[in-house]
Image (tube, rainbow, N blue to C red):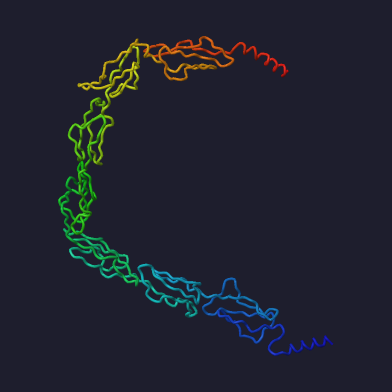
Amino acid sequence: MAMGRLRWLCAVLLALPGLAWGDCPPLPRFAFAEPTKPLKDSYAEGDRVRYRCRPGYTMAAGKFPEIVCEAGSRWSENPDFCIGKSCGQPEIPNGNFEYSTDLRFGATIAFTCNEGYRLVGALSSQCVLKDNEVYWSEIPHCDIIPCPPPPGIENGKITSGDTDFVFGMVATYSCDKNFALIGDDTIHCTMDDNLEGKWSGPAPECKVVRCENPEVKNGRKVSGFGTEYTYKNTVTFECDPGHVLKGSSVVTCEADSTWNPPLPTCDPVYCGPAPRFPFAELSGAAGDRYPAETKLTYRCKPGYVAAEGKSSVVTCQVDSTWSADVDFCIRQQCPPPRIENGYVTADNFLFETVVTFTCPASIHCVVDQQQHGVWSKPTPECKRDDGPVEHVLCGKPPTIDNGVHNGTQGTTFLHGSVVVYKCRDGFTLARATSIHCMAGDQARGVWSTPTPECRASYLALVGIFPLLLAMLVMNI
């Protein structure tokens, strides 16, 4: 019974009008192609339909203009087997074009011109069909931008030979004799924001320019010598010795017949008061200030002499400072003093040096009327002083090891004073028990000899021997 129903359903489907089992729907429509044969009402599985490219299109490489009715009642996919014909790149001298897709049938491009040119014609163009071929609908052109005639000048002329000026061209000016050209001698043709031609600037001027002969007091010209000075002539100055330049050393003759910057000045240079030296003094009167190149002479003070190879002349320099040799005066020297039975204490024997003698006595180095170094007094002598012994004093008595003395109450002791020594327990005095103050050389007090000495006692050594022996036995 089920098999009967299936056969009935198949019969009904086959009886439906317009579409049989396995047929494909109507042919797809393409803007770029059309079928080569008349259309049929239906196409069975396996039917093939060929197309030809419409005007303005051409066969794409690697494609075949045919579709097939496949199983399942559908057409095979084979899109874009025809592509638009190319219009190619348009020629636009002094310009360019812009596009966003390609240059094939239906494409649109926009035109621009190079700097100094402006577009004449349509701003854009489209690739269109004409007589079964494709062309650009319109191609504009780029014209160079013209400038009006350059402005004229009085007392001069335009030396360029051109009569028509366009973008980029230059107009050159020159002046008549005895006239100076003020400004740039050339202007060039350019354009404004509206692509209209204009000149880069105004025309120069032709004027009579005469600057006075420049003079600078206490200065002189280094360059730019002459008697007549015209526009843009320059002069360079420098100052005479002892002067400093204030302002610019180079000036230029300008269009208004003046020097720019203004002429400089050469101002005198001064040094302050004469320098002071501990070893020399100024020969003449001193002042508060001195002009540059001033030379001052100094003389050495008493006790000093001129140093060999050095000048005592001090000079005021152009930087307002004094120049001088270092230590152009040096101290005089006295001959070394000698003393019998004594000696001299001093580091050197130069002027103002003080020496000390052991007697004691001292003299110092001075100069005489002839400016020679001499000693202030005769050289002293050292002799033995045999005066009263009561004037002889001794210092602190000597200390000894392991003992004391009774002379701890004072720092000085008169001649004849006696100091007694005592030893600590376990020690006994040897050599002497006391000393006394006596006269020594050059009236100085000295303590008598020999000095007492404390030595270990024999009984002490005997008493400690048994103890040492017992400690030795216990260690065994």
| Residue drawn at point x = 33 percent, y = 19 percent | 356
Tell me if 437 is positioned left or right of 205 in this view: right
Tell me if 202 is positioned left or right of 395 in this view: left
Whole-percent x, y for residue 364 in the image: 28, 21
Whole-percent x, y for residue 62 in the image: 59, 71
Residue extending furthest toward the right: 1
Residue 326, by quadrant, is top left
Judge whether 44 appears above or below 476 on screen.
Answer: below
Q: Nearer the viewer, residue 332 or 453?
A: 453
Q: Nearer the viewer, residue 475 or 245?
A: 475
Tell me if 416 is positioned left or right of 208 in this view: right
Whole-percent x, y for residue 12 in the image: 75, 89
Whole-percent x, y for residue 308 in the image: 26, 25
Q: How many numbered marks appear?
A: 0
Judge whether 473 appears above or below 55 on screen.
Answer: above
Tell me if 76 is positioned left or right of 418 in this view: right
Judge whether 103 appears above or below 73 on screen.
Answer: above
| Residue drawn at point x = 27 percent, y = 16 percent | 378
Q: Nearer the viewer, residue 97 or 355?
A: 355
Q: What quarter of the picture does the N terminus occupy?
A: bottom right
Q: What quarter of the picture does the C terminus occupy?
A: top right
